Image: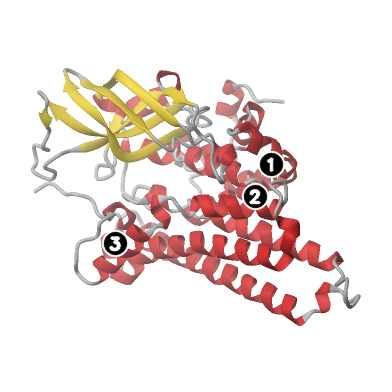
Amino acid sequence: MTITEPARAEATLTGAEILANAKALVPILRKRSAEIERNRRLPDDVVEMLRDAGVFRMCFSRAWGGPEMTSMEQVEVIETIAYGDSSAGWCAKLGSDIGLHANFLDQDEARRMFRLDMHTAAVIMPIGRADKVPGGFRLSGRWPFGSGSTHADWVGSGAFVYENGEPYASPDGSNPHESRLFFVPGGQIESIDNWHTLGLRGSGSCDYRINDVFVPDNHTLTFDSPKVPNGPLVQPEVIQRSMCGVSLGIARAALDHAREVIATRVDRMTDTPWSQLERVQIALAECEAEYYSARSGVYKALERVWEVTADGVGTLDDLTPDERGAPALTGWQAFGMARSVTRQLCDLLGASTLRDDDPLNRWLRDASAIRQHVTAGDRVTQSVGAYLLGAKPSLRIMLGIVDKPA
């Protein structure tokens, strides 16, 4: 039964309870994976299951009545949901960002906009155009890859700001052409049904259009200007941290499935159980090693960031360069690991994985699709490498580097 909105607002969920709820959803999501993929977006009742489980509230602070889960706990929840279904994990991650976005919005207005179990979709790259008008902006544009936008309560869209038809430069001199993230209710976007893809087919990551919609000033944000006291969840790169949990969940699901198949398979030529074949043992162990290395790296990097910023005084600037670059690099590594592991397992298990309805086939396609995301590409490694060498990163937000007032 779906919880009503007032009941949700009154219910208190701890991080442990949200994780337990996520684990309980795994067998349901696993059974629904083929349907989710055919649907090309999350079915409404699956969205409600995630909502009822408390997944969308996990990033809200205790001041909001949320659990204020650590970055590591958030990754674990997303891993768990993705273990059940990749697209559900992807949308759960993006939907739960609402609690992080709230930290960068005017707090009185954010409380009027958001409630604990609402959820967002957001395309942060400044693709649209926002013209300054009295009290706010007129926002227009078409944004690709709007994952979860078909069912989001609020949609955030990145756009460059213009005034009187000219690029708007921040008055403090920090940015020659300012860009912001603009939030509009989900009902004010026009979804474009063009999500026909190799993988993540169930994420509803279609394009959407916004045509000359008024956005008040206090419905916009930049990640260099938090509206709450400093802390680990108000750092500029915070929304990037848990995304790799989807890839970790995919890899773990693929490994567990492969082990189940291997346990019952017998070589037809020799009548030898696959579990006794040296080549199978080596291949599986190598994949497990890749997984454990990548997962451990992710958690270790996030734990260090949390340790430095948890006192409300420390910021990313208090990390060493290696420590600051580690979350971006280990996340990037996790994306690649999932594709590598699922591909190797498909090669190991052979022709049985060729069909679309085979779980490993789906996980390989999903892992490959995620690997195309900007946070999994060369711009990440270039950015970290440049930062470590004192050069200019191309994707500074991955390192939490934002413009400061002059």
Seen in the image, is 87 located left or right of residue 361?
left
Find residue 376 and report its horizontal and vertical position in percent.
42, 56
> Closer to the N terminus: mark 1 or mark 3?
1
Q: Which residue is mark 3?
A: 383
Q: Which residue is mark 2?
A: 362
Give the colour scheme of this rendering.
Answer: secondary structure
| Residue 70 visible at all | no
Q: Above or below — where is 375 with respect to 151?
A: below
What residue appears at the point 57 percent right and 71 percent down from the top-left corner? Answer: 290
Find residue 97 and report its horizontal and vertical position in percent.
45, 40
Secondary structure at numbered mark 3? helix
Q: Above or below — where is 25 with respect to 285?
A: above
Closer to the camera, 17 or 316? 316
Find residue 385 and report its horizontal and vertical position in percent.
29, 68
| Residues at marks 1 and 2 touching, judged by CB atoms closer than 8 Å | yes
Q: Quadrant of the N terminus?
A: top right
> Label 1 sits on what residue type?
Ser
Q: Which residue is mark 1?
A: 33
| Residue 10 visible at all | yes
- Give the foreground label among 1 and 2: 2
> Closer to the N terminus: mark 1 or mark 2?
1
> Label 2 sits on what residue type?
Arg
What residue appears at the point 27 percent right and 24 percent down from the top-left corner? Answer: 139
Closer to the camera, 303 or 369? 369
- Res 401 → quadrant: bottom left
Closer to the camera, 330 or 323? 330
Instruction: Estimate how packed mark 1 is, as few (under 14), some (14 to 19) or many (20 or more) residues with alpha carbons within 10 Å.
Output: many
> Closer to the N terminus: mark 2 or mark 3?
2
- Res 100 → quadrant: top left
> Label 3 sits on what residue type?
Ser
